[in-house]
């Protein structure tokens, strides 16, 4: 799969990377659209508000389609349209809308807005 990678400040490349392997509470999503915001520019310029390590793949405002779900994931299935809320500093997002009864957290994606 292809990804935009900031290898260092002011050095961006598009490169082939391995498809991520998901864990039992993770979801693999095929991107359909990715937004660019000020934090992506700050990452590119090397002046992000929190410490980061390069290389880094930018893009925290996106929507896509579920490709695969981990064994413990409930409420999502391949083909579902999903998006991630704007929380660049958080690697996990609250999945309360997906699994309110158990209050679990899912890595990778939250189902907030349809993108079809």
Image (cartoon, rainbow, N blue to C red):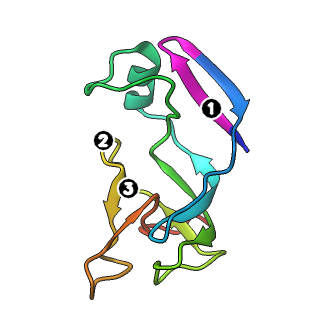
Disc on res. 89: 2
Q: Which mark is residue 66?
A: none
Q: Identify the residue at image location x=55%, y=61%.
A: 22
Question: Farthest bottom residue?
Answer: 101
Q: Which residues are magenta?
A: 3-11
Q: Secondary structure at mark 3?
A: loop
Q: Residue at x 49, y 61 (%)?
A: 83
The answer to which of marks 1 and 3 sits earlier in the sequence is: 1
Q: Which residue is mark 3?
A: 85
How far across and down, in percent of the image, does residue 59 sit? 50, 39
Residue 65 is left or right of residue 75, and the answer is right
> Is 81 left or right of 97, judged from the image as shown?
right
Residue 1 is a magenta residue:
no
Q: Can you say whether 10 is above or below 30 in the image?
A: above
Find residue 37 and report its horizontal and vertical position in percent.
43, 34
Examine the rendered structure and indicate whether residue 107 appears above or below residue 58. Answer: below
Q: Residues within 10 Å of mark 2 (few under 14, many from 20)?
A: few
In the picture, the quarter occupied by the C terminus is: bottom right
- The answer to whether the residues at label 1 and label 3 have Cβ atoms under 8 Å apart is no
Report helix, strand or loop for mark 2. loop
Above or below, 55 relative to 101:
above
CA distance for labels 1 and 2:
18 Å
Which label belongs to residue 4? 1
**Mark 2 or mark 1, which is nearer the start of the sequence?**
1
> How far, Cα to Cα, is label 1 from label 3?
20 Å
For label 1, the crowd category at 10 Å Cα-Cα, with few meaning under 14, some 14 to 19 and many 20 or more, is: some
Q: Nearer the viewer, mark 1 or mark 3?
A: 1
Percent position of residue 60, x then y? 45, 44
């Amino acid at each position: 799969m292809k990804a935009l990678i900031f290898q260092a400040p002011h050095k961006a490349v598009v490169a082939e990377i391995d498809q991520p392997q998901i864990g039992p509470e993770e979801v693999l999503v095929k991107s359909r659209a990715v937004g660019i915001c000020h934090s992506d520019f700050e990452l590119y310029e090397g002046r992000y508000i929190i410490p980061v390590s390069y290389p880094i793949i930018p893009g925290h405002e996106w929507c896509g389609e579920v490709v695969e779900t981990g064994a413990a994931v409930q409420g999502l299935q391949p083909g579902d349209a999903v998006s991630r809320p704007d929380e660049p500093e958080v690697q996990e997002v609250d999945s309360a809308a997906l699994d309110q009864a158990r209050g679990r957290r899912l890595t990778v994606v939250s189902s907030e807005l349809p993108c079809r």
